[in-house]
Amino acid sequence: MTDYVFRLVNVFAQTPLSGNPLCVFEDARGLDGPLMQAVALQFNLSETTFVLPSQRASASVRIFTPTFEMPFAGHPTLGTAHVVRTLRATGDALKLEMPAGIIPVQANGGLWTLQANAPVHRQPTASPADLAAMLGLAPADLADAPALWVNTGSDQLVIPLASRDAVQRALPRAELLLAHGSNGQRAMAYVWAYEPDDVNAVDGGRAVVARFFFPKHASVIEDPGTGSACANLGGWLLATGAPLPQQLTIAQGAAVGRPSRLFLEVTADARILVSGRVIEIARGVLSL
């Protein structure tokens, strides 16, 4: 039997039992990909990460959902960085090696920030009417701005909506999400809208409400806090010619009882920065 130590952390959390949960295995040497996948299914969180040595960064990290490996994801990056800082005594600046590339991560007090990759984007093949039907909404609920596939490390469909009310009313249909929200490997939709006021924004920025949906076992699951989609929203802003710099405070997760707060900055030189707080809540050992 070999013991593998893990930590449970909540990312984008303002309180200990909010945000998006993550399991981080401190030393995954001895685990191959199929076994990592089985462990991720055992924990059944949105993602589980496995820390390994790296010659190019502070650590190498593999990220698994219960069903597949991801090249990059936001909340696993921030949560794993929080753990790696303790394990490797890196200080507040470190780099994580992932299949998507080397991701710089920086801490400022309790706030962690990652710099996403430069974005690429493309138009969806689905029509606005198809996308509205996919979300259980009317065409008038879509914003007067384009939906785009955006990839800053994880390819996702970003759909701006006309109002906070439309975001809250979204009720995607699994079969239409598979038909219109798939990139050929997996299906998803990130919907967002500006808040009617910016009372929840920080540093003079704007406030956004967002939700992230994906199909699972013929139903639709909602993620409480999606850092990769937050980064892709930054890519959407760049693709649509938004004025720079931009600062957004994003509320996500309230609909599933896990309120999350994400901070997005797109700098004047087009760097995409995603920030959030990480709170460790538990430690344990898995024996295999």
Image (spheres, helix red, strand yellow):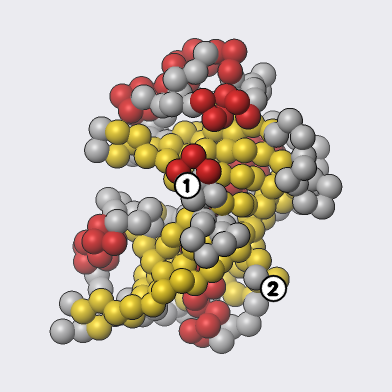
Identify residue for label 1: 257
Which label is found at residue 67? none
Q: Amino acid at mark 2?
A: Gly
Q: Nearer the viewer, residue 159 or 116?
A: 159
Q: Amino acid at mark 1?
A: Gly
Secondary structure beneath dot 1 equals loop
User: Residue at left 53%, top 43%?
Assistant: 254
Residue 244 occupies quadrant:
top right
How many discs appear?
Answer: 2
User: Residue at left 49%, top 61%?
Assistant: 17
Q: Position of residue 270 (x, y in %)?
A: 73, 48
Secondary structure beneath dot 2 equals loop
The reply to whether residue 148 is visible in this rendering is no
In this rendering, the label closer to the viewer, 1 or 2: 1
Q: Position of residue 93 (x, y in %)?
A: 64, 75
Identify residue for label 2: 109
User: Residue at left 33%, top 28%?
Assistant: 174
Which quadrant, please, contains the C terminus? Answer: bottom left
Mark toward the start of the polypeptide (1 vs 2): 2
User: Residue at left 57%, top 57%?
Assistant: 12
Would you say 187 lies left or right of 162 here?
left
Q: Nearer the viewer, residue 36 or 132?
A: 132
Q: Is residue 286 above or below residue 146?
A: below
